[in-house]
Amino acid sequence: MGASLALLGGALLVALLLAELLLRAAGQSYYWAVAKRPDPVLGWRPAPNSSAWQSFEGRALVRTNALGFRDRDHAMTKPDSVVRIAVLGDSFTEAVQVPVEQTWWRLVESRLNGDTCRARGSEVRQPVEVLSFAVSGYSSAQALLSLREHAFDHDPDVVVLAFFIGNDLVENSRALDHEPLRPYLEPTPDGRGLRLDEEFLRGDAYRRATSPAGRARQWLLEHSRLVQLAIQARDALRQHRAARAKGAEAAVARAQASLAQEPGVDSRVFRPPDTLEWRQAWRTTEAILAAFASEVREAGVRPLILLIGTAAQVHPDSIAVARFAQALGVADLGYPVRRLLASADALQVPVVNLPAHMATLAERDGQPLHGFPGAIPGFGHWNARGHQVAAEVATEHVCQLLVDGASRQP
């Protein structure tokens, strides 16, 4: 009996090893299985030096560097005469939906290096490196913590904070957010600074993830293609069930507003805050933006805020957008843009109003800049065209910053 069990166990082990080898040979991998390694400062980061496919929305092979960010490795010491631009943000900047060479920040790098940057009669001829410290799901607070923890170490000349209007406000608020691994920054009582809330370190989710069993599970997630395939199958089933459950709700939304409710976006962001939680979310967000501007300038670096609109704000069907706004009880979807522009103006920080540029272009061309085949048309993350447009607009603003900085040098 014992010999039979040993033989059976050996055969099973061989079968698992063969399956693992076959999956590796076939190129099977799953990015979302390696995208959330616990981090004691940032909450989580992707696994470093990983390479895995993302195929639920768009399709791309996602490679991370030694720090765990989707980018190539960069020397800590900046080479002489090189201009460095650090970008912070969430999934719109990590952009695992498209190949890395199609991401807006890599396109900005290519454009600045491919054509001499000229503005106001001056020019910049130095080579440019764009470094990404963006991670899917990050809040503005996590972006600021990533700046402190990693980006400043690479001596950037410009820091771009990509702010997604759709959920950054919610994710900056513990009262509105439900992510157990997220650190928060909260305004101090005197309103002159920010207090770091690291409650997640004492939470069950982080303790489980960093326990011996949790570390073993994380190792399997990052190294076993069989485990990754099982997680991918589980996520696909959950997505299918969620889509079926929300089918009726989406149909009602389309009937009411000609636009489906955008996944991952809280529509209350389009209204002036009418609850204590939302007023605090705005106050916290504006305090984080102020800290970002102050800390970047104190380091002798130039800040830039890049506003990223929701898919509804830049949908090519302006009539459907107007109906959607009407269903929400607002005149338009511009409230958060106007408020953020006013905040940036008060801080004297240059800002890129991407929603305005993208809405005009999408309506003119009749083509959505969000969305991929197999999903709700015009919704989700930027497609390749969306990244191109974002890069074109962002390049102009970054170029101006570089020229202005060069003109001030003796």
Image (cartoon, helix red, strand yellow):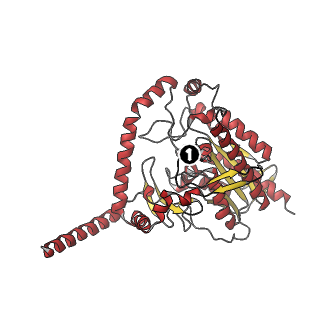
Taking 163 as reference, is 14 above or below it? below
| Residue 133 x/y as whole percent | 60, 59
| Residue 122 horizontal side relative to residue 106, left or right | right
**Is residue 364 toward the left or the right of residue 18 in the image?**
right
**Circle 1 Cα neighbour tier, 10 Å, few/some/many (<14 / 14–19 / ≥20):** some
Residue appearing at x 35%, y 51% in the figure: 234
Q: Quadrant of residue 269?
A: top right
Residue 70: give x, y in percent of width and height: 54, 60
The residue sitting at 56% across, 66% down in the picture is 67
Looking at the picture, does residue 124 appear above or below residue 16?
A: above
Q: Viewed as shown, does residue 85 lie left or right of 123?
A: left
Q: Is residue 386 above or below residue 110?
A: above
Decide if residue 115 is in sight here. Answer: no
Q: Relative to 211, is 258 above or below?
A: above
- Using the image as rendered, state which of residue 384 and residue 370 is in the foreground: 370
Which residue ends up furthest to the bottom in the rendered image? 3
- The residue identified by callout 1 is 177
Residue 408 at x, y = what percent?
85, 58
Residue under the point 63% across and 71% down: 75
Seen in the image, is 136 located left or right of residue 33?
A: right
What percent of the width, then of the height, locates residue 394? 67, 48
Q: Residue furthest left?
A: 1
Tag 1's secondary structure?
loop
Query: From this viewpoint, is residue 197 visible?
Result: yes
The picture quadrant where one finds residue 30 is: bottom left
Q: Amino acid at mark 1?
A: Asp
